[in-house]
Image (spheres, rainbow, N blue to C red):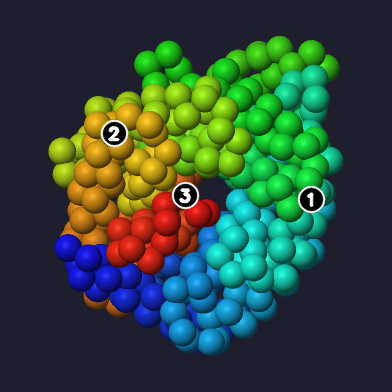
């Protein structure tokens, strides 16, 4: 079985190397499914860290020296984003910089990651217990100091990592509060996830729930479910707060109970056009990586075995049905509501599949990053 994962890993790694040596106008963002040409974001948008993360993973698991220098080069390019007014700095600086420290003890990754973490912590609202979206939050339908969404739970991991390096309990406390408050904001009683919430920044009181990228405000958008799984799993991995593990498991159990029989999620679980609508391999890849993390975190051996088996079947479905021979993960659905890149290669989908394949091939412990 490991040869199967290794073969897929080599396909993706080849795509990483070819992209790293191509003339790019910015961070790879999404790619045309026919030609494979990248649409780039000059400053990294919210997705640039996933490209860096693929370089850091490659540097840590191969003897190919250029991967590390490429990873350092792209990580330095994140420095102008340190003070961006967006909570999505969590994605940029955890995957895009902190992974360098976690995987290789790299000083560039550590320096840039810490700069991003400390600046992000300055936006914390202690009354509401959250890092709000901020006024520059990419793609959110509503932005500012009164908005939150489940995509941002992963920011807690960046702050927890920084807290350990610096011995700063304040950062760890912010990380815990942010992840815990999003359970109230985004996790429904049945384990499904609502993407977004509005709150009163003066009191922290919840004002409304909504799903701004789903088919309806009250739907379960596929990527929101997956973001909840990985966000709460990572938060528990770092902070060992039982409520975080319970939230991650509830979201994972809902995913398993509602995903299609072929394992690859549709873009929104509530789209009435199913099965005649878009899949989202990026949401599916996030879920697979999350399930591998949870298999290593839960104390319940039966649950761990179920999560591992589900992850293996999910990754197998992705590589057999959607991974091209030249390492492009197709059928990612970026933003169906506005018709943006609805059947494309998406850099974050590729990252999470790459991470999951490293785990399945035995090259990475699931809870190391």
Q: Residue 170's image quarter?
A: top right
State left or right for residue 78 relative to residue 333.
right
Q: Are marks 3 and 1 in contact (CB under 8 Å)?
A: no
Q: Earlier in the sequence, mark 1 or mark 2?
A: 1
The residue lying at 48 percent from left, 38 percent from top is 233
Q: Earlier in the sequence, mark 3 or mark 1?
A: 1
Identify the mark at residue 367; answer none if there is no mark. 3
Q: How many C-alpha atoms fall within 10 Å of the one at disc 1: few (<14), some, or many (≥20)?
A: few
| Disc 2, SS | helix
Observer-nearest of 223 and 177 = 177
Q: Quadrant of the N terminus?
A: bottom left
Residue 224: x percent and y percent? 46, 35
Residue 131: x percent and y percent? 72, 34
Q: Earlier in the sequence, mark 2 or mark 3?
A: 2
Q: Residue 174's image quarter?
A: top right
- Residue for badge 2: 301
State left or right for residue 86 relative to residue 48.
right
Q: CA–CA distance between discs 1 and 2?
A: 34 Å
State left or right for residue 202 relative to residue 150.
right
- Residue for badge 1: 166
* Residue 300, above or below 2: above
């Amino acid at each position: 079985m490991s040869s199967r994962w290794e073969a897929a890993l080599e396909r993706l790694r080849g795509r990483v190397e070819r992209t790293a040596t191509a003339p790019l106008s910015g961070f790879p963002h999404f790619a045309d499914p026919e030609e494979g040409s990248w649409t780039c974001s000059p400053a990294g948008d919210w997705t640039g860290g996933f490209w860096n993360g693929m370089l850091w993973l490659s540097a840590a698991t191969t003897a190919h020296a250029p991967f590390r220098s490429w990873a350092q080069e792209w990580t330095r390019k994140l420095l102008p984003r340190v003070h961006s007014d967006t909570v999505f700095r969590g994605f940029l600086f955890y995957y895009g910089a902190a992974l360098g420290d976690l995987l290789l003890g790299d000083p560039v990754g550590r320096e840039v990651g810490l700069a991003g973490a400390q600046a992000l912590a300055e936006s914390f609202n202690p009354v509401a217990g959250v890092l709000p979206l901020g006024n520059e939050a990419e793609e959110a339908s509503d932005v500012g100091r009164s908005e939150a969404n489940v995509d941002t739970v992963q920011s807690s991991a960046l702050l927890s990592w920084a807290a350990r390096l610096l011995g700063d309990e304040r950062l760890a406390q912010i990380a815990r509060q942010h992840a815990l408050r999003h359970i109230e904001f985004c996790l429904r009683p049945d384990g499904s996830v609502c993407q977004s919430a509005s709150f009163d920044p003066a009191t922290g009181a919840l004002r409304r729930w909504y799903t701004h990228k789903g088919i309806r405000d009250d739907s379960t958008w596929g990527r929101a479910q997956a973001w909840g799984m990985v966000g709460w799993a990572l938060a528990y991995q770092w902070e060992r707060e039982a409520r975080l593990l319970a939230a991650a498991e509830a979201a994972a159990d809902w995913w398993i109970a509602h995903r299609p029989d072929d394992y690859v999620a549709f873009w929104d679980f509530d789209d009435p056009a199913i099965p005649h609508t878009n899949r989202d391999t990026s949401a599916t890849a996030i879920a697979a990586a999350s399930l591998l993390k949870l298999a290593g975190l839960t104390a319940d051996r039966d649950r761990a075995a179920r999560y591992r088996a589900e992850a293996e079947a999910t990754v197998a479905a992705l590589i057999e049905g959607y991974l091209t021979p030249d390492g492009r993960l197709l059928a990612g659905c970026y933003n169906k509501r506005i018709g943006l890149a609805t059947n494309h290669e998406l850099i974050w989908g590729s990252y999470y599949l790459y991470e999951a394949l490293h785990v399945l091939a035995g090259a990475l412990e699931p809870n190391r990053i």
